[in-house]
Image (cartoon, grey):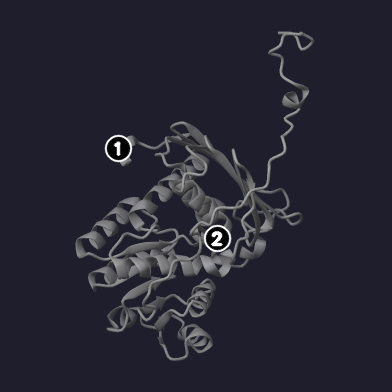
Amino acid sequence: MSETSSDSATPSLAAYSLSAGAAADVAAPDLDYRPPMPSDRSIGIGLIGAGGIAQAHLDAYRAYGLNVVAIADRYVERAVALRDRYFPSATAGDDARAVIDDARVAVVDLATHPAERTPLMREALEAGRHVLSQKPFVEDLAQGQRLVELAERKGLQLAVNQNGRWAPHLAYIREAVRAGHLGEVHSLCVQIHWDHSWVKGTRFADMPFLILEDFAIHWFDFAASVLGAVPMRVRAVNGRSARQTIAAPLLAQIAIEFPGGQASLTFDGAAAYGATDFTVVSGSGGAARATGPDLGTQTVELFTAAGRAIPRLEGKWFNDGFAGAMGALLCAVESGRTPINNARDNLWSLRICRAAIDSARDGAAVDIAPSEA
């Protein structure tokens, strides 16, 4: 059909220019996106690993009135410093096994590096302790499956500190999907531009897949929580900025195919200026959009047939996300129900992550076998 045709089916100029119609403002639904907390906040927590991220754990636990009774790190001075700052009545030392064996400890919070976590998780579960693992949960999926099965045999909770689950903007969008406000989800788009050069001089700076494995894992997990379908295929590229000064590539793009839809994620960790964080989830009944300059400052808009709703969100990813990850586990310990951040489900997030790494390394799409479902 010619663009000059007078046919009545000819799209309007607004349609050609992708112009959006105005939407009426409506009240935002009240969704339960805030960090969950148990009725009994005295459940004993033992923290193993007192590195930089442990401060976020402890600050969140103190803010929410949780009960940390023991802290251990191979550098005892770090354990003591964090104990004195956040939980002065806790014990502090350099013996991880002493934390696991402490009768006051019901939950072991493991904030060590991945290679050190796996044997500690097994020890803690064998000792009858519930476990919250830092992310990524495991480096080897088969090991992760065995740990999940061990926890289930012993009737214990094993959860993963995917703290992004309780970043207010991501949590609200997830709950909007769970409540049916978006209908059947068919698309997820994430674009994040920020400066990740803070890793210079740390162990992270030498990770060949730093962005995919340590940062994008939050959005692989988010994708797994909202797509509602088993991913079929993953394509990814991993690259370096021309001017970056650390070894680890700071650029990554990922495409995820799943039945009835797709997800696209773009990460630019070399953006020294103009930081931007953008997320859109679209479905048959609506769409949700979050925009802002960074992970902690976000505005969410929910679009449905009724109009546009802008919820007034409370909290921030750091450190409400850490309170949410532990709070969900403690609620599960108290109720016996499976937490939303349980390790079995998290294996799907890791399958997406491993497929992205394999694709970026080998330059080809990676299929995820249906038998893994």
Given the current orientation, which residue lies at the most extreme bottom position? Answer: 89
239 in relation to 118, above or below = above
Give the residue type at disc 2. Answer: Ala
Count residues near mark 2 (Cα–Cα under 10 Å), then give few for <14, some for 14-19, many for 20+.
many
Given the current orientation, which residue lies at the most extreme right position? Answer: 4
Contact, CB < 8 Å: mark 1 with mark 2?
no
Q: Position of residue 6 (x, y in %)?
A: 77, 8
Instruction: Say which label, 1 or 2, has the lower sequence index.
Output: 2
323 in relation to 146, above or below = below
Tag 1, which secondary structure? helix
CA separation in Å, label 1 and label 2? 32 Å
Q: Is residue 320 left or right of residue 296?
A: left
Q: Nearer the viewer, residue 150 or 293?
A: 293
Q: Quadrant of the C terminus?
A: top left
Give the residue type at disc 1. Answer: Ser
Q: Position of residue 20 (x, y in %)?
A: 72, 34
Q: Nearer the viewer, mark 1 or mark 2?
A: 2
For label 1, the residue is 371
Count residues near mark 1 (Cα–Cα under 10 Å), then give few for <14, some for 14-19, many for 20+.
few
Given the current orientation, which residue lies at the most extreme left position? Answer: 153
Per the rendering, the mark at residue 167 is: 2
Tag 2, which secondary structure? loop
Q: Quadrant of the N terminus?
A: top right
Can residue 307 be seen here? The reply is: yes
Q: Is residue 265 left or right of residue 50?
A: right
Q: Is residue 334 left or right of residue 7?
A: left
Residue at 47% from the left image edge and 44% from the top image edge: 180
Can residue 120 be seen here? The reply is: no
Q: Position of residue 349 (x, y in %)?
A: 43, 49
Q: Nearer the viewer, residue 252 or 206?
A: 252
